[in-house]
């Protein structure tokens, strides 16, 4: 089966470079207008969404009615860093803040008071397993961290390395799931379609 994952539309905190995590930020007016002008390029048999407002608003704007809300699609919890920019994090916690929180790298990375990358991977893998047991292809409206985690589960990318240049998280990540929910990349960077009148 296929699972299409896409990130929510833009927010004011995205524009300001603030870390959102579990903070429930709505889409910006520009983000809402952008998503309302787009549609999926294929039919959606099953639709899932993070329960955070920005993901729910994205599903509604894309005319994906009544998504199943699943907390496993929420963004990584960034703890004390939510609401801060990278520069503010460096000012408050030192220039090596990200290095110290990822001293063992990869799945051991944990923002101060937040969720580790390994915990994020585990819940995304659990979601993929459950989705794979259902009927028909599916769509999930999620967040940057969830797309990165799904890409990692499919490719083995080490998340302590720079973002892979072939992964554009503003576009659709299409996964193939086997019966146990193990993902592989079916297609990278699928474009959303323009809404037709």
Image (cartoon, helix red, strand yellow):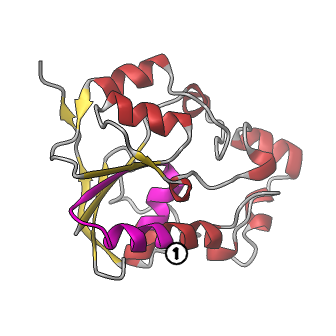
Residue 176 spot, x, y in % from top left:
25, 70
Quick check: 119 above or below 16? Answer: below
Residue on which disc 1 sits: 158
- Whether residue 192 sits left or right of residue 18 in the image: it is left
Question: Who's the residue at 36% across and 82% down the image?
Answer: 180
Quick check: 66 above or below 176? Answer: above
Residue 135 spot, x, y in % from top left:
24, 66
- Whether residue 187 sits left or right of residue 102 in the image: it is left
Span of residues in magenta: 125-150
Question: Who's the residue at 12% across and 23% down the image?
Answer: 196
Quick check: 5 above or below 24? Answer: below
- Image quarter where the N terminus lies is bottom left
Q: Pick the residue in front: 166 or 14.
A: 14
Verify whether residue 146 appears in magenta: yes
Label 1 Cα crowd, 10 Å radius (few <14 / some 14-19 / many 20+): some
| Residue 65 quadrant | top left
| Residue 97 quadrant | bottom right
Question: Who's the residue at 33% across and 73% down the image?
Answer: 133
- Image quarter where the C terminus lies is top left
Label count reads: 1
Quick check: 43 above or below 98? Answer: above
Question: Who's the residue at 32% across and 60% down the image?
Answer: 166
- Whether residue 83 sits left or right of residue 152 in the image: it is right
Residue 72 spot, x, y in % from top left:
54, 59
Q: Pick the residue in front: 99 or 49.
A: 49
Residue 182 spot, x, y in % from top left:
36, 79
Verify whether residue 13 appears in magenta: no
């Amino acid at each position: 089966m296929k699972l299409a994952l896409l990130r929510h539309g833009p927010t004011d905190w995205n524009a300001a470079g603030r870390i959102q995590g579990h903070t429930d930020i709505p889409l910006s007016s520009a983000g809402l207008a952008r998503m309302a002008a787009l549609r999926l390029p294929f039919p959606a048999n099953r639709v899932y969404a993070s329960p955070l407002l920005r993901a729910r608003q994205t599903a509604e704007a894309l005319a994906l009615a009544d998504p199943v809300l699943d907390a496993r699609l929420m963004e990584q919890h960034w703890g004390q860093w939510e609401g801060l920019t990278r520069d503010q994090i460096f000012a408050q916690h030192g220039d090596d803040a990200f290095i110290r929180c990822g001293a063992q790298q990869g799945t051991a990375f944990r923002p101060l008071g937040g969720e580790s990358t390994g915990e994020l991977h585990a819940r995304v893998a659990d979601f993929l397993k459950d989705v794979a047991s259902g009927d028909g292809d599916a769509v999930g409206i999620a967040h940057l961290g969830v797309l990165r985690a799904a890409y990692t589960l499919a490719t083995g990318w080490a998340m302590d390395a720079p973002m892979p240049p072939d992964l554009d998280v503003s576009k659709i990540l299409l996964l193939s799931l086997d019966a146990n929910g193990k993902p592989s990349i079916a297609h990278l960077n699928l474009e959303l379609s323009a809404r037709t009148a």
